[in-house]
Image (cartoon, rainbow, N blue to C red):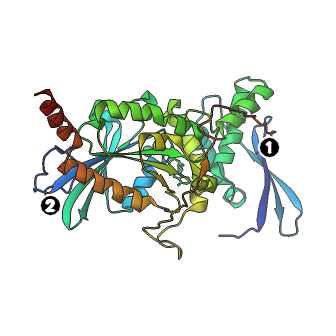
Amino acid sequence: MDADGDADTVLDYDGKSASGTEAVKVICLGDSAVGKSKLLERFLLDKFKPQTISTYALTLYRYSSKVKDVDVIVDFWDTAGQEMFQSMHPSYYHQAHACIMVFDATRKITYKNLERWYKELRQYRPHIPVFCAVNKIDANMDVTQQKFAFPEKNGIPLYYVSASNGMNVVKLFRDAVEAALMYKKDPPDVTDQIFQELQRL
Amino acid sequence: MSEITQKMRKLGIRFDPPSLVLIYSNDKMKLHQRVMPVRNFNAGSNVNFFATQLKQRHEEFLHSVPLISIEKMLRILQEHIRGSPLESILKNINSEYEINPDEDLNKLTDDQLHRKKLIMEASFVANQLQPSDPDYEYDRQVDFEDNKIESGWDSESNAKETETDDFWG
Ligand SMILES: Nc1nc2c(ncn2[C@@H]2O[C@H](COP(=O)(O)OP(=O)(O)O)[C@@H](O)[C@H]2O)c(=O)[nH]1
Ligand SMILES: [Mg+2]
């Protein structure tokens, strides 16, 4: 087992992990019971080591993978009840490289609440890549014929998924991991900053 | 295990003496009634615990009855013990045990949320494809075509009617 095997420590995601492997942080956001945990479980099957960090009411799943032949450690952060406070602890967003926002195909209110989650996310992480997933399409196939204004207007890709039958789940997570890695290598906010500095000269 | 070929028809609750009532039919389609006493149950009892116990004690009859249905009956009994009028009991308990698509589940307590998730679990399990299933595919991808219609979730109109059930679950 290598130095990064156990998820008992929160990594410094801006740098590399102890063993020198690239590490990224992907967070999940959305209302209670939309299926965030089930989606993660479906993607990871039993290859993960979940770790509950109870102080912040969150669960961390550490996942080792290869993206384009490069080893990468991905920490997926999942909430464990913090939805109750209608907002996340700032440490949840800290250093995140990508975000997956989930709503429930059978409950309109979870779609409506995306606005609020998104607003909070952008306060902390204005530029990270965001993915939107409508989950439980197995229970409401009609949504697969439908479009939604929230992702469209924010330029966020929408994935039609089911944690139950597995539809499009792996694609969603792989795309998010890849985007997280790209973001880490070339964070647009830094470039933006430099650009702004240049303009000021 | 003795295989009793019976089909659950209805589950109900009787207040005095407190008991769970199951109506079931056997293979000849004849209806039977089974009355199962609920002992030492009070206003503060944990319904999940009592439901589990009942299910174990009457396994033969209750094995195909979802735990959540037994819990629901015990909640009705509990509210009755607390002195609530039947009308309001049925209204409140029904909403406890159904998913209202407009209800904000973020605001629930852990217990309440757990109950809602148990109800949702039914469709999850019914539709689930696991590695042991022949149709299972780890990376299952389906592209849904592009010409989509508005979902209706972006307009503000909101017509919603609530339905009420009766005593039987
Ligand atoms: N039918 C169906 N149910 C699902 C699906 N994903 C999750 N659920 C159910 O929704 C409930 C909430 O799921 P959970 O992962 O705990 O949601 P979380 O609170 O967002 O982490 C559970 O009872 C699941 O069984 C899905 O794809 N289809
Ligand atoms: Mg969860």
Identified at 25% across, 62% down, the residue is A65
The residue at 17%/36% (across/down) is A195
Placement of A25 over or under B85, stated as above or below? below
Residue A189 screen position, x and y as percent: 22, 38
* Whether the residue under disc 1 has CB within 8 Å of ligand 1: no
Q: Residue at x 27, y 50 (%)?
A: A180
Asked if residue A51 is positioned above or below residue B107 in the image, the reply reads below
Q: Chain of mark 1?
A: B
Output the chain of dot 2: A
Q: For mark 2, what is the residue?
A: A2
Q: Are marks 2 and 1 on the same chain?
A: no
Which amino acid lies under the numbered mark 1 shown in the image of this protein?
Trp
Q: Residue furthest bottom?
A: B134
Quadrant of the rendering where the N terminus of chain A is positioned: bottom left
Residue B4 visible in the current orientation = yes
Residue behind mark 1 = B168
Give the residue type that dot 2 points to.
Asp
SS for tag 2? loop
Is residue A156 rendered to the left or right of residue B47?
left
The kind of secondary structure element at disc 1 is loop
**Quarter of the view holding residue A48:** bottom left
